[in-house]
Image: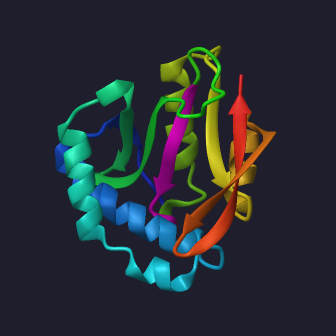
């Protein structure tokens, strides 16, 4: 657990961040989804393969208005958020979607996720409708999103992850 985090900087991700984003992505999944996603799948997650995907995505630039922000402190990447146009068929005009927000588990509870989501919301504008999908069993994340003005809208879907069908709930704001 991190004892203290100095000033956090939120900035656009670059290709140089790909390896650290991938490492945070894997560690966060393994910690946050333990007991939710099959353990074998979590063990199989590979930062190197995710690094390659992140490097390609970041090198391609903000395609289709997709943006990735990173949070860092003292030169260490603490977390990231990716957002863009809503991918839902029933999206409202101009609706945006948070595709991912993940933190290194050692930084949980230190306000880094709050800084990231506030930056995302400021960038899209207070009046822009936003959506996101969260695993129904991820109570920590669901509580976090509620604190930031999101609420379930009644739409759910099954997502197959690691061979298991897991329920996701859509949250909306605005």
- Using the rendered image of the protein, determine whether residue 69 is visible from the camera's viewpoint: yes
The vertical placement of 173 against 49, above or below, is: above
Residue 100 magenta-drawn? Answer: yes
- Residue 1 visible in this rendered orientation of the protein: no
Vertical comparison of 104 with 121: above or below: below
Left or right, residue 134 beside residue 59: right
Which residue is found at the position 60% from the left and 14% from the top?
Answer: 93
* Scheme by which the image is coloured: rainbow
Q: Position of residue 128 (x, y in %)?
A: 61, 17
Please, is residue 32 above or below residue 131 in the view?
below
- Tag count in the figure? 0
Q: Residue 35 location in percent, x, y?
A: 65, 79
Which residue is at a point 51% across and 74% down the rendered structure image? Answer: 162
Q: Residue at x 49, y 85 (%)?
A: 40
Quadrant of residue 49 within the rendered picture? bottom left
Q: Nearer the viewer, residue 57 or 173?
A: 57
- Relative image position of residue 69 (x, y in whole percent): 38, 38
Kindly report the secondary structure that dominates the magenta region of the rendered protein: strand
Look at 54% across and 84% down and name the residue there. 39
Instruction: Give, as a single range, the part of the protein colored magenta.
Output: 96-105
Residue reaching furthest to the right? 154
């Amino acid at each position: 657990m991190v004892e203290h985090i100095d000033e956090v900087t939120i900035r656009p991700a670059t290709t140089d961040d790909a390896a650290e984003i991938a490492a945070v992505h894997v560690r966060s999944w393994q910690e946050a989804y333990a007991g939710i996603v099959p353990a074998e799948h979590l063990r199989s997650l590979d930062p190197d393969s995710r690094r390659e995907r992140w490097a390609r995505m970041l090198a391609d630039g903000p395609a289709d208005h997709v943006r990735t922000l990173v949070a860092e402190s003292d030169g260490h990447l603490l977390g990231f958020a990716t957002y863009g146009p809503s991918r839902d068929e029933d999206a409202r005009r101009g609706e945006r979607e948070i595709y991912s927000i993940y933190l290194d588990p050692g930084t949980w509870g230190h306000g880094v996720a709050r800084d990231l989501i506030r930056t995302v919301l400021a960038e899209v504008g207070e009046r822009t409708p936003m959506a996101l999908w969260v695993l129904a069993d991820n109570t920590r994340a669901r509580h976090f999103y509620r604190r930031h003005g999101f609420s379930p809208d009644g739409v759910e879907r099954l997502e197959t992850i690691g061979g298991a069908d897991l329920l996701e709930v859509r949250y909306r704001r605005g």
